[in-house]
């Protein structure tokens, strides 16, 4: 039986649920309570892909401006920084302040401490606040909010995956930019919604760990 040590907990704003950070012998887990495991430092292949794949589609990565919705355990941010140039800037929006502190503290080494990178900017708050500012601000937008279109933690997160949210995302994207959405699984209804809103999205299935086991879904589309 594995032994877990609880390192911290964080209320989820606007919800009766909370997050808990646990450390095992050589890994960390974030649970949603009540509920189940939300993320694990052993399984982050699809988070890596969310950071890397949209950046690889840019014509010029040297000075790209990127927005990431959801810090998680820092793996998406780390992958994006690795894919982008030295003059790039990546803003990561995280709703829960404690998640940022966990990434500055015990979780940081797992992803290589991407919050310490001088190209990183942190917005503690809802990524929707930044999307609503519009004005073609970003070359890349990568959204890993809640559990994808089928929300797990907050009903308010559904806006990201609505017609209004898609319109705001398009408005925030520069011409020639790329947007990516992460989901725990396939969602044909969201794929159809993307098409109805003018996104010619490519759907990719990515393993959570290595080349086996569970696969997550990433949609990629140009602006």
Image (tube, rainbow, N blue to C red):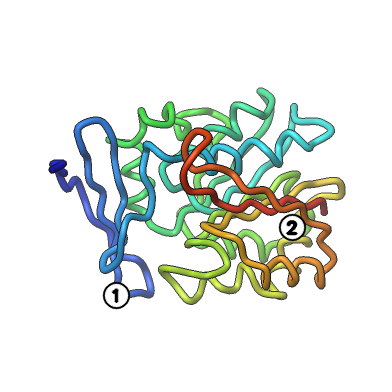
Asked whether the beta carbons under mark 1 and mark 2 sit within 8 Å of each other, the answer is no
Up the image or down, 67 lies above or below 32; here it is: above
Q: Which residue is mark 2?
A: 172
Q: Position of residue 171 (x, y in %)?
A: 78, 62
| Quadrant of the image occupied by residue 10 | bottom left
Which residue position is annotated with label 1?
Answer: 16
Establish if 13 lies above or below 102: below
Classed neighbour count for the residue bearing mark 2: other residues with Cα under 10 Å, few (<14), some (14–19), many (≥20): many
Q: Secondary structure at mark 1?
A: loop
Quick check: 122 left or right of 12? right
Look at 16% across and 44% down and name the residue there: 4
From the viewer's perspective, is the residue at label 1 or at label 2 nearer? 1
Identify the element where label 2 is drawn. helix
* x, y percent for residue 79: 57, 33
Is 6 situated above or below 79? below
Q: Tell me what residue is drawn at x 60 percent, y 53 percent.
A: 217
Please state, as top left, top right, bottom left or bottom right, where the N terminus lies in the image: top left
Say which label, 1 or 2, has the lower sequence index.
1
Residue 172 x, y percent position in the rendering: 74, 57
The residue that appears at 37% across and 30% down in the rendered structure is 110
Q: Looking at the rendering, which quadrant does residue 106 occupy?
A: top left
Residue 170 relative to residue 74: left or right: right
**Alpha carbon distance from label 1 to label 2:** 31 Å
Location of residue 55 (image quadrant) = top right
């Amino acid at each position: 039986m594995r032994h877990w040590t609880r390192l911290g907990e964080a209320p989820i704003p606007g919800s009766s649920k909370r997050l808990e950070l646990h450390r095992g012998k050589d890994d960390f887990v974030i649970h949603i309570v009540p509920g189940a495991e939300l993320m694990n430092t052993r399984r982050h292949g699809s988070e890596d892909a969310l950071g890397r794949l949209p950046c690889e589609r840019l014509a010029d990565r040297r000075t790209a401006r990127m927005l990431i919705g959801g810090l998680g355990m820092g793996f998406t941010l780390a992958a994006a920084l690795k894919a982008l140039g030295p003059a790039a800037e990546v803003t990561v929006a995280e709703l829960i302040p404690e998640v940022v502190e966990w990434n500055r503290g015990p979780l940081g080494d797992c992803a290589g401490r991407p919050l310490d990178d001088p190209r990183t900017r942190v917005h503690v708050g809802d990524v929707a606040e930044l999307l609503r500012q519009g004005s073609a601000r970003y070359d890349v937008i990568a959204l890993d909010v809640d559990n994808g279109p089928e929300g797990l933690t907050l009903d308010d997160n559904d806006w990201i995956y609505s017609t209004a949210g898609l319109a705001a995302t398009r408005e925030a994207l520069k011409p020639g930019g790329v947007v990516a959405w992460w989901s725990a699984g396939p969602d044909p209804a969201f794929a159809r919604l993307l098409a109805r809103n003018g996104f010619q999205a490519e759907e990719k299935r990515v393993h959570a760990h290595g080349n086996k086991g569970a696969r997550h879904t990433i949609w990629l589309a140009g602006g």
